Amino acid sequence: MEKIKDINRLNDVFFKSLLGSKERKNLTLNFLNSILNKDEDSYFVDINFLDKERLPDIEDGKVPELDILAKLNDGTLINVEIQVTKQEYFSKRSLYYWSRLYAYQLNKGQNYDELKQTITINLLNFNYLPYETCHNSYHVYNDKTQDILIDDLELHFIELNKFKLSDIRKLRQAENWIAYFSPKCTDEQREAIAMNNPVIKEALNYEMVFSQDEIKRRQYEIQEKAIRDYNSTILYNRQEGLKEGLKKGAEDKAIEIALKMLENGSDINFIADVTGLSIEKNKRVKKNSYVHFFSDKETNQITTSCITYF
């Protein structure tokens, strides 16, 4: 069985298999330490996956968000999420998920000092933030001094489409992983990165292993179909909405012209010919509209405002 052509590394089945499995936790630890820019003193050395989301519902084709939820050796909680479809209020959703994870650490009788740092890493397949940089992180700062109040909150937004690959030899650790997942990076460029980075090489090698697993490959293909169906539905709705908007705009303009012609006493049949509105609709316009006269206090000019009800 051949390797999946143009494999979608943001497919949650593949991503969960690559970085959400204890068999490859060395890759997950490297990913986290790289993205979070950990040094030798704070380097995560072990990880425990807390749970895994079920696969998308095959029957209704839902595409749930991916969450990799894990606890690090120092108690830090990590939530890694991939989001492939644009959401206007994604930052609110991300903060909401973070708050639930942070709050649910405590059971009855536990003290607040037992709360551990909670970090969310969002890999986005769309542009969301108003910055050119592809990786932006957020904490709780003092507005004046910029001192961190508490480091328990940490949110990362990685916009993969903004990644720009320049000199492969000068890539930082985090950029190696961002390049691996970014759709802006070619397979040839990934292979070049892997020559100097054994972890990325291991990730590329796993793609073949994943492709040979019939069950995982089938789950991957089901997820890809669900994503295609979702995107197709969104595109259709947008196109239909545009058509309806143009139609509504044209009709509104025709009604505006009809109102002006009615004011001037034009024949209703002539108005129908000019505007394209039916005679019946022109009659409704005439019956259900009125002209309101008001005076502009600054200019002392008389102005009319036509209000139509249907």
Image: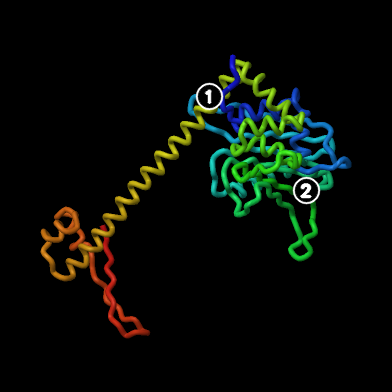
- Spot occupied by residue 219 in the image (x, y as percentages of width and height): 57, 22
> Which residue lies under the disc numbered 2?
152
Question: Is the residue 218 above or below the residue 257 in the image?
Answer: above
- Spot occupied by residue 181 in the image (x, y as percentages of width and height): 64, 35
Question: Is the residue 211 above or below the residue 269 in the image?
Answer: above
- Indicate the colouring scheme: rainbow
- Spot occupied by residue 134 in the image (x, y as percentages of width and height): 65, 47
Question: Is the residue 90 above or below the residue 79 in the image?
Answer: below
- Quadrant for the N terminus, please: top right
Query: Among all residues in the image, which is located at the extreme right?
Result: 41
Task: Give the residue type that dot 1 points to.
Answer: Ile
SS at circle 2 = strand
Specify whether residue 35 is in view.
no
Quarter of image, res 186? top right
> Which residue lies under the disc numbered 1?
222
Q: Which residue sits at x=44%, y=35%?
A: 232
Specify whether residue 258 is in view.
yes
Q: Circle 2: is it few (<14), some (14-19), or many (20+) Cα within 10 Å?
A: some
Quarter of image, res 287? bottom left
Quarter of image, res 290? bottom left
Q: How many marks?
A: 2
> Relative to residue 128, is residue 265 drawn left or right?
left
Residue in front for this viewpoint, 297 or 157: 157
Q: Which residue sits at x=29%, y=71%?
A: 305
SS at circle 1 = helix
Q: Which residue sits at x=43%, y=36%?
A: 233
Q: Which mark is residue 144?
A: none
Decide which of tag 1 and tag 2 comes sooner along the chain: 2
> Relative to residue 88, is residue 69 drawn left or right?
right
- Spot occupied by residue 188 in the image (x, y as percentages of width and height): 64, 31
Looking at the image, is mark 1 or mark 2 nearer the viewer? Answer: 1
